[in-house]
Image (spheres, rainbow, N blue to C red):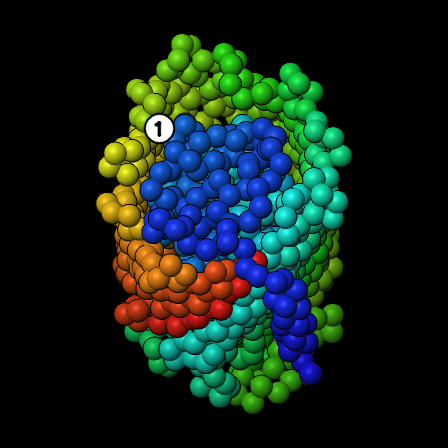
Amino acid sequence: MTDRNRRLVWLLGTAAIASLSHASPSSAASLQTDGQAATPSSTGPSRPSASPATTDRGQAQDQNNSPDRGDIIVTAQRRSSSLLRTATPVTALTADALQRQGANRIADYAATVPGLSVVSSQPGQTVVMIRGIGTGHGSAIPSTVATYIDDVPYGSSTATAYGSIGTLDLDPGILERIEVLRGPQGTLYGASSLGGLVKYVTRKPGLTDFTGRVEADGTTVDHGAAGGGVRVMLDGPLVKEKLGVTVSGFYRFDPGFLDDPFRKKSNVNTFEVYGGRIALYWKPVDQLSVELSAVLQNSHSPNTSEVDLTSGLTPIYGKYSQVRWGNENWDFKTRLYSLNANYDLGWGTLTSITSYATRNARWDIDETTKFGAAISGFVGVPNLALFDNVTLDHKKTTQEFRLSSPNGGTLEWLTGVFYTHERSVKPEGFGRPFDATTLQPVPAAYPAGGLFFDTIYDRYTEYAGYADVTLRLGSQFKILGGIRYTHSTEDSDTPSSGALNGGHTDVTGRAVSNTWTYLLTPSFDIDQNNMIYARFATGFRPGGPTNLAASLLAAGAPAAYQPDSLDNYEVGYKAKFPLAHMTVDISAFYLDWKRIQLLTQVGGFNVTGNAGRAHSKGVEFAWTWMPVSGLSLSANGAYTDARMVVDAPLVGAKAGDQLPDTPKFSGNLSADYDFRISDDVGAFIGGNYQYIGSRPIDYVSGAPANYVRPVMPSYDLVNLRAGIKFGGFSIEAYVKNVGNSYGLVRLRSQVKNGISAPFAGAIVQPRTFGISVVDKF
């Protein structure tokens, strides 16, 4: 029995036991009896009263499905607040709504969030950008969007440890909702949140009633095969009203849809992911609550979702084909352990958040087209294929102490200190070349000491202190101000060896950053249903050493890159119209991005540096309407004009050039209708339309003066969904990409100069059918 089958059998057995362990479905899981659409997150027991940094379970609702967003509770400002009373642009997506749509990855729901865009070549390896603040796909650059799991920062703040491409697609099965904050969040969330924040909010253990959820899924994709998975969740008290537990597990196998005619393989781009979460919630007295949590997730993808294209973007080997000289494996393992304690002092709440996380990755990159001919000439053996093999071992420890006043009153305040320490080890080297025709080893092509090998030993430490104060001047006007000071150091040691390095070398580097970030947000409540606000906020990414060998430094690569920073100017309007069952959220922004950290290439290797300045300006909106009972309509969209305003010769960018991978226009239209077939049986139907505008590809360093970056054409997607529910049991089905759109989500040259064909184009998943059988109890 394979490891995959063992995992699947274990989860199926757990699901069967859980399903048989209850006598009758909970009436709370059924549709509302008045015929209105059930709120996606309203099932499950209520949680004990939340601290200022948490929310009650069941209060968050998907803004695309809820008719009354005034009831949505988010934690965008580190305390519970109504979405319509939060003076910052934030979108909330519930896990139930995502599961209903079969949206398991960020790429599946990015278009439902105004201003959010992604670029990815491989499942589980995604770069996230908000409001155009990004410079494309690259492993050697920090992220512009921070990721949090509850109140714990996830991932790395450095370029060394896959800070950008290591974005986590956390499975919805362990979540309550996802919050996406647009614009810099530098005062409360610190480094690498200059574009915004993706915050995964997990399910909190209940202290009163036992509940559970068992789900079995099946999928099939055009031009591919079948897949599926299971999800299991059990929740309830171990000691009633004192100690609760949540245990969840999942396994999913997504079928591939690309073939490799050279290797005579079909469906080479499968994706397998499994993991789970366990959390204990302890409330020994009313004033104290403690939550201990462990999250794990493993994923494996043997190949990219890229097809080979000509310079005119015509498929070379077929519309759904790629040619590689071996598997481009991407294995990614995440472990996150956290302890969150809150104590109510009466006049305020003291919070301690401790975490320890590990991330391990393995990445095999086919470099034959880029370096094969050069290596053949170097070693004197023709027709060679070759792979670059990279691994990562990353460990991160964080500690935060926070003290916050109660909600309400003339003056609200929040202050805290934050510490993080990261250590990473990242070996990288060219493997043994082999014959590109027979795929057999060629020992004569591998010199003594190898071709190229280095190991980056990196240490990053950050200390920060912050404070936010909200002053209410009367019943309608308030001012929020915030400040944060961050001190960070990064040290690296990079021993290198191999014939291409000229033998053994050892490069050390150090970077020190001291950064202040600020926030000022005045807001005015026109009445209880209408609010306007203005927002000035700043964000940053720390600098760091480039960890490059002496040969690359001699070729012109920088020894270190500097911090970049961003200033955000914004106005917004939020409103609900109770009689019309309608909500509106509109914001307009202008961003000034300075000393941009850009990914360039020296000798074909990715290098981080600073160059240029950019502005991003635009408008975002979100609208919901329930014209009749059970019918929910929504729309959102974004116009983003993100451009360089100063030349960046390092990467061949000129003033006026559009920033990479972000469409000027994007949007989503959605409709859902929940209705009753009988007193005992309910149903729903729905669908949405997504539009992604055209996007230029990444900048290319060393490109000739007349080079024009290729543009990925616009594309659109139609998705449909339907289901039937009786009691806690439901059968749900969906079709994604109904029209089989052939959209590009990443485009890159495969050759060393970075501008010539063949190109590799990652494509959206073709038409996919899915069905889920769900039992809630």
Position in image of residue 58 (x %, y %):
51, 43
Position in image of residue 396 (x %, y %):
70, 45
Q: Quadrant of the N terminus?
A: bottom right
Nearer the observer, 43 or 336:
43
Query: In the picture, residue 638 is in which quadrant?
Result: top left
Asked if residue 512 is positioned above or below residue 533 in the image, the reply reads below
Farthest front residue in view:
679
Q: Residue at x 43, y 44 (%)?
A: 61
Q: Residue at x 30, y 43 (%)?
A: 624
Circle 1 residues within 10 Å: few <14, some 14–19, many ≥20: many
Q: Amino acid at mark 1?
A: Glu
Asked if residue 146 is positioned above or below residue 13 in the image, the reply reads above
Position in image of residue 387 (x %, y %):
59, 72
Nearer the observer, 549 or 672:
672
Query: In the visual, does 579 lie left or right of 221?
Result: left
Say what secondary structure mark 1 lies in. Answer: strand
Q: Residue at x 44, y 37 (%)?
A: 72
- Can residue 85 be seen in this snapshot? yes
Position in image of residue 686 (x %, y %):
31, 59
Nearer the observer, 222 or 431:
222
- Can residue 592 be seen in this snapshot? no
Q: Quadrant of the C terminus?
A: bottom right
Nearer the observer, 449 or 348:
348
Query: In the visual, does 508 lie left or right of 214?
Result: right
Q: Residue at x 53, y 69 (%)?
A: 216
Tally the marks.
1
Query: In the visual, does 617 lie left or right of 437?
Result: left
Asked if residue 474 is positioned above or below residue 770 in the image, the reply reads above
In the picture of the structure, the residue carrying the numbered disc 1 is 570
